[in-house]
């Protein structure tokens, strides 16, 4: 059974810093990995999707990498802004029904 | 991206009543939809996989008679919380994948979630 872990659980940085969020998964037989953002009391916003055949995806200031052999993914946020403050969730797509298994999330606070 | 709509976005009900939550894919068809539950300050936990035209598949520990799932069409899945109790209060989120994307490769799109409060 797929297990997804995210470190750190919480992170606070000053505005402008570059930062890395980490995600690890136990089953390397994933189809893809998604990174999401969740604001308090809200649903999920999909940030990046990395297919199993890819190593990274970029969107604006965000870059996500995937290393299936080591069971790791990272989300890199460049030049962080207060508006980036949210909980970031990674999820691995695996299993017979291709369901997503979520990590516990990293709560990011970017201080102005 | 594709749009998944959930209704209602929030609901308050009395203990013992039943509540139905709808999940619709607005601009694509989905043979499979997923229902998640999220308690405060916790991550999303998969409750069940909803399959169009057949029975849902429930995760271990999720009571199928309490959480009734119906996936009657390629664009609609419903979750009914029967005889709701305060411990069922949670944030329920559905997701769906465009069936044209093929199994396992397509992005999952999420609804905005439905917050249930049982008094």
Image: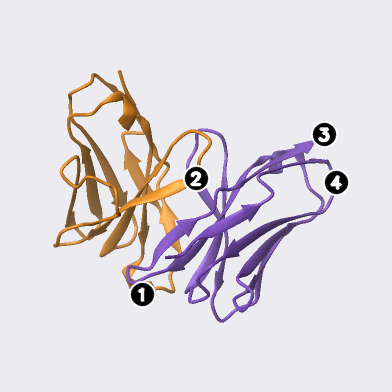
Chain colours: A purple, B orange
Of the residues tagged 2 and 4, which is closer to the observer? 2
Q: Marks 3 and 2: which is nearer the front?
A: 2
Query: What residue would you read off at disc 1?
Result: B103
Mark seen at residue A16 = 4
The answer to the question of whether label 3 and label 2 lie on touching residues, with beta carbons closer than 8 A, is: no
Residue A90 seen: yes
Kindly identify the residue that appears in the image at 68 percent across and 58 percent down.
A22
The Cα–Cα distance between marks 3 and 2, rounded to whole angstroms, is 27 Å
Which part of the image, by quadrant, shows the N terminus of chain A? bottom left
Cα distance in 3D space between marks 3 and 1:
43 Å
Callout 3 and callout 1 share a chain:
no
Graded by Cα atoms within 10 Å as few (under 14), some (14 to 19) or many (20 or more), the crowding at tag 3 reads: few
Foreground: B68 or A79?
B68
Q: Position of residue B62 (x, y in %)?
A: 27, 47
- For residue A34, what is the image quadrant? bottom right
Chain ID at mark 3: A
Q: What residue is pinned by disc 3? A: A112
Which residue is under mark 2? B43
| Nearer-N-terminus badge (2/1) | 2
């Amino acid at each position: 059974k797929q297990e997804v872990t995210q470190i750190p659980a919480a992170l606070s940085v000053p505005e402008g810093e570059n930062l890395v969020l980490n995600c690890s998964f136990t089953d390397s037989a994933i189809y893809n990995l998604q990174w999401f953002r969740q604001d308090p009391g809200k649903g999920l916003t999909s940030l990046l999707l990395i297919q199993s055949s890819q190593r990274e995806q970029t969107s604006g200031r965000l870059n996500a990498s995937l290393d299936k052999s080591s069971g790791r993914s990272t989300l890199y946020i460049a030049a962080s802004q207060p508006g980036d403050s949210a909980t970031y969730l990674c999820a691995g797509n695996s299993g017979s029904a291709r369901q997503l298994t979520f990590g516990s999330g990293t709560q990011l606070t970017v201080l102005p | 991206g594709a749009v998944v709509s959930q209704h209602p976005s929030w609901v308050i009900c009395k203990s013992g009543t039943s509540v139905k939550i709808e999940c619709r894919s607005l601009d694509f068809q989905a043979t499979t939809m997923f229902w998640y539950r999220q308690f405060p300050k916790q991550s999303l936990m998969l409750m069940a996989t909803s399959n169009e035209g057949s029975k849902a598949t429930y995760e271990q520990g999720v009571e199928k008679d309490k959480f009734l799932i119906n996936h009657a069409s390629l664009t609609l899945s419903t979750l009914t919380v029967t005889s709701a109790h305060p411990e069922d209060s949670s944030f329920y989120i559905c997701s769906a994948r465009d069936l044209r994307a093929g199994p396992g490769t397509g992005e999952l799109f999420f609804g905005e979630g439905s917050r249930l409060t049982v008094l």
